[in-house]
Image (cartoon, rainbow, N blue to C red):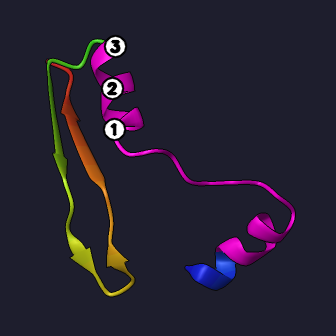
Amino acid sequence: MVTGWLSMMLTGKDMDFDQEVIADSMQRAGFMSVRSHIPETPMGPMDLDIGKKT
């Protein structure tokens, strides 16, 4: 994953979002239920946002 993003990072194309940005956007877009979870992965903890539209 890191090597795949390396060229983007070196060219200044940031692929990161601040925490809660995705979940807040999902709620504004009309998702009825939005849950956020931080699972532990081999690359470290990652934010996971799950939304239910109906």
Q: Which residue is mark 1?
A: 20
Question: Height in image: 11 above or below 49?
Answer: below
Distance from the alpha carbon under mark 3 to that under mark 2: 6 Å
Picture coordinates of residue 33, whole percent (x, y): 12, 26
Q: Quadrant of residue 15?
A: bottom right
Distance from the alpha carbon under mark 2 to that under mark 1: 6 Å
Element type where label 3 sits in the image: helix
* Residue at 34% over, 13% down: 28
Q: What is the crowding at mark 2: few (fewer than 14 residues within 10 Å), some, or many (at least 20)? A: few
| Whether label 2 touches label 1, CB < 8 Å | yes
Q: Which residue is mark 3?
A: 28
| Whether label 3 touches label 2, CB < 8 Å | yes
Element type where label 1 sits in the image: loop
Q: Nearer the viewer, residue 17 or 29?
A: 17
Q: Which residue is mark 2?
A: 24
For marks 3 and 1, the one nearer the N-term is 1
Question: Height in image: 41 above or below 50?
Answer: below
Q: What is the crowding at mark 1: few (fewer than 14 residues within 10 Å), some, or many (at least 20)? A: few
Which amino acid, by three-letter code, is at mark 3? Arg
* Residue at 77% over, 65% down: 8
Picture coordinates of residue 40, whole percent (x, y): 22, 76
Asked if the stretch drawn in magenta spans residue 10, the answer is yes
* Residue at 75% over, 67% down: 9
